[in-house]
Image (tube, rainbow, N blue to C red):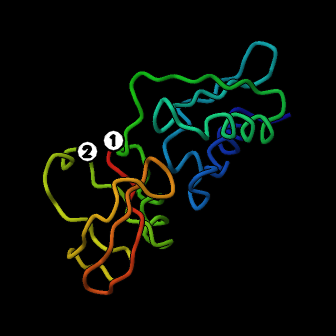
Amino acid sequence: MVSLAEARRIADGVPDPELPVLTLGELGVVREVNELADGRFEVVITPTYSGCPALSAIRDDLVHALPGASVRTVLSPPWSTDWITEEGREKLREHGIAPPRRTGAVDLPLSVRCPRCGSPDTELVSRFSSTACKALHRCRACLEPFDHVKEI
C-alpha cells in the first residue's frame, strides 16, 4: 500500500516527456495528489500550456507510475514559469537550456544569459525551437546556440 506522501513523491518524480532533464514536480506541473475514498489516487496537473502536445504522454506516464490513479487537468490558474523550482532551473542550466526569468521581467527587453558561458550577449535566432515552449538563441561570446524556456 502506497501512502499519500509516497504517491506525491512518485508523481513529482515522473520525468517531463519534452524536457526529460526535469521532473513534473520540478517543472511545477503536478498541483496536487489526493487519496480517493476507494484508496486510489488522483493526480491534479496543470500543463505548461493548454495545447501542450505532451499532455497525453504526461497522463500515461503518471498512470504508469501510479497504477490505478486518475489524472485531472486543471487550467486555472494557468501554469507559470514561476512554478519551476530552483532545482529545475539549475538542471536546465546544467543541460544547456537557459531557464526562464521570473514573470515580472517578461515585458522587459532583457537579454537571456548563455547557459554555457554565462554571457548576457545573446541574440534570438528563432521564436520557436524544439518545442513551442522554447526559443532558440545564440551566444555572441562563445557562438553556441541554446534553447531558452519562454516565460509564461
Amino acid carrying mark 2 in the image: Thr
Q: Residue at x 21, y 47 (%)?
A: 106
Which secondary structure lies at badge 1? loop
**Residue under circle 2?**
103
Distance CA(mark 1)–CA(mark 2): 7 Å
Q: Residue at x 46, y 64 (%)?
A: 92
Q: Position of residue 24 (x, y in %)?
A: 58, 46
Q: Residue at x 56, y 46 (%)?
A: 25
Q: Residues within 10 Å of mark 1 (few under 14, many from 20)?
A: some
Counting residues from the start of the chain, the first of labels 1 and 2 encountered is 2
Q: In the figure, 93 relative to 58: above or below?
A: below
The numbered mark at residue 16 is: none
Q: Return the residue nearer the eye: 107 or 74.
A: 107
**Residue under circle 1?**
152
Q: In terms of image quadrants, where is residue 134?
A: bottom left
Q: Position of residue 94 (x, y in %)?
A: 48, 73
Mark in the foreground, 1 or 2:
1
Q: Say if mark 1 contacts mark 2, CB within 8 Å.
A: yes
Q: Return the residue nearer the eye: 51 or 113.
A: 51
Q: In terms of image quadrants, where is residue 101?
A: bottom left
Q: In terms of image quadrants, where is residue 62?
A: top right
Q: Position of residue 82 (x, y in %)?
A: 35, 45
Which secondary structure lies at badge 2? helix
Amino acid carrying mark 1 in the image: Ile
